[in-house]
Amino acid sequence: MNGAQLLRSLSLREGRPMGVHLQVADRCNHSCHHCYQVQGEKGELSFDQLCRIIDGIADAGVFTLNVSGGEATLRPDLLDILRYARGRGFAVRLFTNAFLIDEAYADALAAVGLLEVHVSLYSGVAEEHDAVTRVPHSFERTVGAITALRRRGVRVVLKTPATTLSVRGALGVEALARELGCEHQASTDLTMREDGADAPWAVRVTPEELLRQGMLSPWAPSADEARARAEKLEKYPCGVGRSGLVVLPDGRLQACTDTPNILADLTQAGLADALQQAPERELFEGLTWSRVHGCRDCDLLPACHRCHATALREGGDYLGPYASACARARVRYGAAAGSLEVLPPSADCAPGRDPAVGPYAIVATGVIRPVHDVRTPADEALAQRFAWVRPPVESGLVTLRRKAPLQSSVAQPSSVPQVERV
């Protein structure tokens, strides 16, 4: 068992969050095409306010603290924030674009004793990285900062989301990471902006291209597919509400960076009390694949990776299937099968059923058919209790990120419809 697995095991056993992501800055010195954030609208807390929030996170028994922004290094008191967090016993990660880290700053960060520094790097080619950030010479300065940190023995993780602006993106950064002695993490999906705009998707890479670049791998059913499916149904698609908790720069608490409902205001209550009082805690603690309708009945489930927040933005249902995740699963299966044919939806599907969205049944090698998406009374009760997980279509998606009075996400249950087939 590695360190991360040990922390996760302790977290689950003791019923406390493994980590919290603390955003300390509502501004950035880059203007990345794919960024999900809207800068300059939330405001920022003072050092003393942040210390009180950090105290509350420590008192809740959290193990790790990720400090980020916007761009955290824009705060003159960042080093003091990091030192205070270390003094409270956290394993601390810093998330940064590293643009402002020079030799002296690298010295100071090394002295803090950080667990890791996570640096965004979009390509091993300077022109491609700079095209993403829209800041000339950002590649040169970022790589210089990474080199300075590594010379001081600081553990650095390079992070690369795939974009159309960086053709060799992850492959080039992976090679550079080996050269610099860094770890590397690549991601294949981009989320919508927090105000609901889909601008980041303008540079989203197609599943076919992700497969060609090796960022997606072919998938075929295993010899014991029933066991593989059963095991996955018991797992969590992500750490939302558990290891993905996020504190916005103004102190409001969210379940993750992209889930748009507000759980609490940590300037008014400590984390432990906030979680105890948040009705969503029950939702997130039980949010395994078995609670995701459609996906749980899909034969492509073992090939699927999802983001609940993207499901909400893209498909209007936090707990349902959505087109871009289904597209990646289809491409993975088609690559293993050698070809892919999508038959018309089964007869028990509703008229107008979109064949681009699962669930699917594999009817022969390389041949799939859309089948009905079964929503049980329990699914409907959950959507009624937490109205934001499936907002009415006519109302559009309402984001609660902007500074506003906190809103309850609890809806009073009414009559529960029977199983719905779509």
Image (cartoon, grey):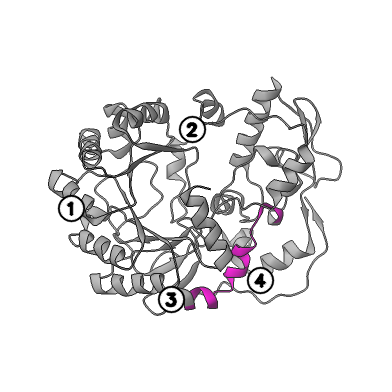
Residue placed under numbered mark 3 in the picture: 405
Q: Quadrant of residue 195?
A: bottom left
Which label number is shown at residue 385? 4
Residue 158 visible: yes
Dot 2 surroundings within 10 Å: few (below 14), some, or many (20 or more)?
Answer: some
The image shows residue 26 at horizontal and vertical percentages of 30, 59
Indicate whether 56 appears above or below 157. Answer: below
The image shows residue 73 at horizontal and vertical percentages of 23, 53
Q: Is residue 305 left or right of residue 220?
A: left
Badge 4 or badge 1: first in the primary sequence: 1
Dot 3 surroundings within 10 Å: few (below 14), some, or many (20 or more)?
Answer: few
Residue type beneath disc 2: Val
Residue farthest to the front?
1
Residue placed under numbered mark 1 in the picture: 108
Q: Element type at marker 4?
A: helix
Tell me the magenta residue range: 273-290
Badge 2 or badge 3: first in the primary sequence: 2
Q: Element type at marker 1?
A: helix
Residue type beneath disc 3: Pro
Residue drawn at the location 79% of the way across and 45% of the way down: 351
Of 318 and 198, nearer the camera is: 318
Of 152 and 321, nearer the camera is: 152
Distance between the alpha carbons at the discs numbered 2 and 3: 37 Å
